[in-house]
């Protein structure tokens, strides 16, 4: 397999729909995160191996102890990876501007979470890719606590292992198991090239059915 940086560039260049289609044909039919998880702004894209984060709601956590766990976790996310949070809690902001500034400064590729985000204008100005569920000013620190990192997690119906490839664009987020990531990417690139041919043929007057019969996809 080629280096992670080159692999990431290729994943960023492909659209998530192509990846989802290839995964479907392979029998991986639950690899797309819930549609409530959206990019903060249009045009955001991300790709990288998953650094998994599991958390849980709490009413009794110490603010200081809870914050220290999160800060330690933020410092552990490797460059080029995507921090993926399974929050189990969707009513507060689990990510904010200072956390994002720290991640971006160390070359982290982005963050995906089924929880909330705040300080949106700062994050957008920074250009750091974030895909999240709610946007809210409410702080999660005294309402939520970090449980584990780099363990298997689930977001919606998708099971995510550390190192699985996480790819996001305006359509949403797809998770590609690392064991098949290279072959899925190769097939998705071939599919995208074929779809470019179909697009040109349809523009030139070919009917959709004729295009399907010629290219065996649409």
Image (cartoon, rainbow, N blue to C red):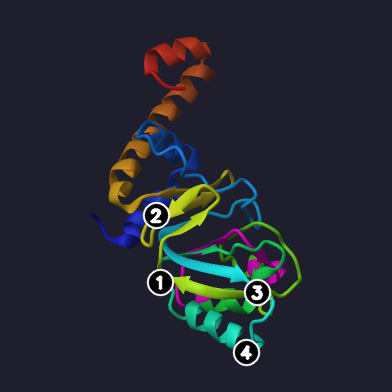
Picture coordinates of residue 100, whole percent (x, y): 58, 73
Check residue 159 in the rendering and tell me which mark sits there, or answer none: none
Picture coordinates of residue 18, whole percent (x, y): 44, 37
Q: Is residue 212 left or right of residue 59?
A: left
The answer for how far apart the CA atoms under marks 4 and 2 are is 33 Å
Q: Please, what secondary structure does the residue beneath circle 3 have?
A: loop
N-terminal-most mark, 2 or 3 = 3
Q: Identify the residue under disc 2.
A: 165
N-terminal-most mark, 1 or 4 = 4
**Circles 2, 1 touching at the beta carbon (< 8 Å):** no
Q: Residues within 10 Å of mark 4 (few under 14, many from 20)?
A: few
Residue sitting at 39 percent across and 54 percent down?
Answer: 165
Q: Identify the residue under disc 1.
A: 79
N-terminal-most mark, 3 or 1 = 3
Residue 25, picture quadrant: top left
Judge whether residue 108 is colored magenta. yes
Residue sitting at 75 percent across and 72 percent down?
Answer: 138
Q: Identify the residue under disc 4.
A: 64
Q: Please, what secondary structure does the residue beneath circle 1 have?
A: loop
The answer for how far apart the CA atoms under marks 2 and 3 are is 30 Å
Picture coordinates of residue 70, whole percent (x, y): 55, 79
Residue at the left extreme, as displayed: 1
């Amino acid at each position: 397999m080629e280096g992670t940086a080159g692999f990431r560039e290729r994943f960023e260049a492909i659209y998530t729909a192509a990846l989802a289609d290839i995964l479907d044909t392979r029998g991986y039919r639950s690899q797309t995160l819930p549609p409530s998880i959206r990019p903060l702004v249009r045009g955001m894209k991300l790709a990288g191996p998953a650094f998994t984060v599991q958390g849980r709601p709490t009413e009794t956590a110490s603010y200081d102890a809870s914050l220290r766990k999160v800060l330690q976790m933020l410092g552990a996310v490797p460059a080029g990876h995507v921090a993926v949070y399974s929050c189990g809690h969707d009513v507060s902001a689990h990510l904010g501007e200072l956390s994002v500034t720290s991640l971006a400064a160390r070359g982290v590729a982005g963050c995906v979470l089924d929880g909330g985000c705040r300080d949106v204008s700062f994050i957008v100005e920074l250009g750091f890719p974030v895909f999240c569920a709610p946007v809210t000013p409410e702080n999660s620190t005294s309402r939520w606590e970090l449980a584990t990192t780099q363990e298997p997690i689930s977001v919606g119906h998708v099971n995510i292992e550390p190192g699985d490839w996480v790819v996001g664009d305006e359509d949403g987020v797809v998770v590609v198991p690392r064991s098949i990531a290279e072959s899925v990417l190769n097939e998705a690139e071939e599919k995208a090239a074929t779809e470019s041919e179909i697009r040109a043929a349809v523009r030139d007057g070919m009917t959709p059915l004729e295009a399907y019969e010629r290219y065996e996809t649409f």
